[in-house]
Image: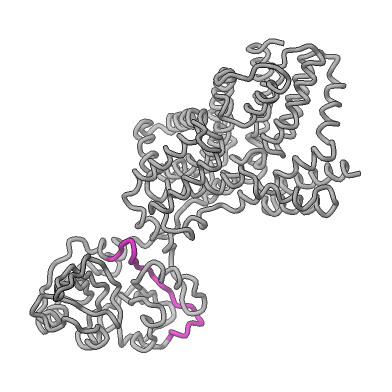
């Protein structure tokens, strides 16, 4: 009974995946719950996927990939590839796939996709092509790269260990490499031929666009701030020293606004203020000798202010650069229709006190109001330019009643914070790859080390930034689908089918049985992880080989090869799940591209495997 229910759940899951009416992760969780409710799996068995090292590794690789993208390393690598390929998109396509195959020969296919994904997306956007045209090929070639070396895929290691368990020599590091080279070349040729026919290429599929970003230069230009920002130095003779901004009432008296204060290292009696630091200007900010005040206002107002307090006005070297730093940023804010700020003057709403942000300007239907802002009454439709710490801007973005923050301040803040750290991200990536290749730690630990280093070195701003970069749809999808293999094994479903294939095709000799095991492995490998598929079919394959007095290496390499052919569904491999959301693919996209490729690879492998490893 449980066997029948297991196959019914599997069939319904496949049907729901195919119709694409429900999100893939929701379908996977529904299947998981069905196994528990019907007592096929225990809760512990059902939830085991969420603690699986593959799932943890995927989550960590999202963080590493985000650091590579955020620091600009992905863009640099993409520019280098573009330089090598010139203006030829076909050459770029082939070069990209070859590089993925080489990288994937020495690390897991999941790790390869996660590391290359931000680079590929960056390249696609730079040449104004939908990432969906590149990401599915990326996943396919990463799967094929698993056949390049012994360590490139768990399926190879499982096949090798099964041979050892039955008294045979383990596979060598490059034993399977000829198969991998042939498979990779075949897939590249196929993808080149169908890339403009079967691969989706719709701009609206890409979900990797960073969205609207209000860059500092754009702000300075739109609000005409280039001649309204000044740097004022507090000298020893200035009468403004040791006074609070609140007591000076500068907006009311001079119509100017202090945006930030750069405090300098100054001798104060026997004490020395040891370091220069910046402070967002506020009512309680105290001005000291040696400070630099960053002032916004009209030139004549600033000149009058400087004259009255014996200050020195110095020109800005870069207006836009001073608007945004790693800690302080700007954002545009819109008033909602129900906003309590409408019809209230800037001076009365207490924006600074309530949100800890300064108002720099008001955009009213294309007119930029910068003078006498304190007296301006806000209207619905106004866009307000505010400045403050990035943390305060992010807090404001969670406000839903009075204001709406335009764009993605977290993205801009992260990009500013990670500026110049591409070499650090590169070192972290190489360190992680080295730890994985030389097996210093388990792959999941190497990835977590890389993820943590991305955060503590500032390639990502903080843990919140890291969590925001995780694609939880892919993570939940993989975690929920892994226990399906447990259900199939527990109910005896795979064993029954495998023995049936052997019984049915035994009369055709070793070649017929190899074909049957290969096909069964491929079919189940589209819905169960390649690792689980290899674990289940390796013992069956070697038992069949010994029973027929055939070469066990032929059968074991056949299983390892078949388990890597994860093309026809987005759940066939974690790599497919990774690109599913990033490329905006549908279930049927994988079917259209993957099924013909499966047929081609079946023919190629059934010729190649017995030829290189005779029965």
Q: Residue furthest right?
A: 1
Magenta span includes 340: yes
> Can you say which quadrant of the picture contains the C terminus?
top right
Q: Position of residue 84 (x, y in %)?
A: 36, 31
Please say which color scheme the image uses.
Answer: one colour
> In the displayed structure, does residue 354 sit left or right of residue 536?
left
Q: Residue furthest front?
A: 270
Q: Quadrant of residue 221?
A: bottom left
> How many dots with numbers?
0
- The answer to whether any part of residue 449 appears in the image is yes
Q: Quadrant of residue 247?
A: bottom left
Q: Residue at left 62%, top 19%? A: 171
Q: Quadrant of residue 126?
A: top left
Magenta span includes 395: no
Bounds of the magenta span? 323-342
Q: Residue at left 82%, top 16%? A: 547
Q: Residue at left 35%, top 68%? A: 330
- The answer to whether any part of residue 600 appears in the image is no
> Can you say which quadrant of the picture contains the N terminus?
top right
Q: Nearer the viewer, residue 460 or 133?
A: 460
Residue 103, placed above or below residue 218: above
Q: Position of residue 528 (x, y in %)?
A: 71, 39
Q: Position of residue 116 (x, y in %)?
A: 48, 39
> In the displayed structure, does residue 614 sit left or right of residue 512?
left
Q: Position of residue 595 (x, y in %)?
A: 68, 32
> In the displayed structure, does residue 540 sit left or right of residue 435?
right
Q: Residue at left 25%, top 67%? A: 277
């Amino acid at each position: 009974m449980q066997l029948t229910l297991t196959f019914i759940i599997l069939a319904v899951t496949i049907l729901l995946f195919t119709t694409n009416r429900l999100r893939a992760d929701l379908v996977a969780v529904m299947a998981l719950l069905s196994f528990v409710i019907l007592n096929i799996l225990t809760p512990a068995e059902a939830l085991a996927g969420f603690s699986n090292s593959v799932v943890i590794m995927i989550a960590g690789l999202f963080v590493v990939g985000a650091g590579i993208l955020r620091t600009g390393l992905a863009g640099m690598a993409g520019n280098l590839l573009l330089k090598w390929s010139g203006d030829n998109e076909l050459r770029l396509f082939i070069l990209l796939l070859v590089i993925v195959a080489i990288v994937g020969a020495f690390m897991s296919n999941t790790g390869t996709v996660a590391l290359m994904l931000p680079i590929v997306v960056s390249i696609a956007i730079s040449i104004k092509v939908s990432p969906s045209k590149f990401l599915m090929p990326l996943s396919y070639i990463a799967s094929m790269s698993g056949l390049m070396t012994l360590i490139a895929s768990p399926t190879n290691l499982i096949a090798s260990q099964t041979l050892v368990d039955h008294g045979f020599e383990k596979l060598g590091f490059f034993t399977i490499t000829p198969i991998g080279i042939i498979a990779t070349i075949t897939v590249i040729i196929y993808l080149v031929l169908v890339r403009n026919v079967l691969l989706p290429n719709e701009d609206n599929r890409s979900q990797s666009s960073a969205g609207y970003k209000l860059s500092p230069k754009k702000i300075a230009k739109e609000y005409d701030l280039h001649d309204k920002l000044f740097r004022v130095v507090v000298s020893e003779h200035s009468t403004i020293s040791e006074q609070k901004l609140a007591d000076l009432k500068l907006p009311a008296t001079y119509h100017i606004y202090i945006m930030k204060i750069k405090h300098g290292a100054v001798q104060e009696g026997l004490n020395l203020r040891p370091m220069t630091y910046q402070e967002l200007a506020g009512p309680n900010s105290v001005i000291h000798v040696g400070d630099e005040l960053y002032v916004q206002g009209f030139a004549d107002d600033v000149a009058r202010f400087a004259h009255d307090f014996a200050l020195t006005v110095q020109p800005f070297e870069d207006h836009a650069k001073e608007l945004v730093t790693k800690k302080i940023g700007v954002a545009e804010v819109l008033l909602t229709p129900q906003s309590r700020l409408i019809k209230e003057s800037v001076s009365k709403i207490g924006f600074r006190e309530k949100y800890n942000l300064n108002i720099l300007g008001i955009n009213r239907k294309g007119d930029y109001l910068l003078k006498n802002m304190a007296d301006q009454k806000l209207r619905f439709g106004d866009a307000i330019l505010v400045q403050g710490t990035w943390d305060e801007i992010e807090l404001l973005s969670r406000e839903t009643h009075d204001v709406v923050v335009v764009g993605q301040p977290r993205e801009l803040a992260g990009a500013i914070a990670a500026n110049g750290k591409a070499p650090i991200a590169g070192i972290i990536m190489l360190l992680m790859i080295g730890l994985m290749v030389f097996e210093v730690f388990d792959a999941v630990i190497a990835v977590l080390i890389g993820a943590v280093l991305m955060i503590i070195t500032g390639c990502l701003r903080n843990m919140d930034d890291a969590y925001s970069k995780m694609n939880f749809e892919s993570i939940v999808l993989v975690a929920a689908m892994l226990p399906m293999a447990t259900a199939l094994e527990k109910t005896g479903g795979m064993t029954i089918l495998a023995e049936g294939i052997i019984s049915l095709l035994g009369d055709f000799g070793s070649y017929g049985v190899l074909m049957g095991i290969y096909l069964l492995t491929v079919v189940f490998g589209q819905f169960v992880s390649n690792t689980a598929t290899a674990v289940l079919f390796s013992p069956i394959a070697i038992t069949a080989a010994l029973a027929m007095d055939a070469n066990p290496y032929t059968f074991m390499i056949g299983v390892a090869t078949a388990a890597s052919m994860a093309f026809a569904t987005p759940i066939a491999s974690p790599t497919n799940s990774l690109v599913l959301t990033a490329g905006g693919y549908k279930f049927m996209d994988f079917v259209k591209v993957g099924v013909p490729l499966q047929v081609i690879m079946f023919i190629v492998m059934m010729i190649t495997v017995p030829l290189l490893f005779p029965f």
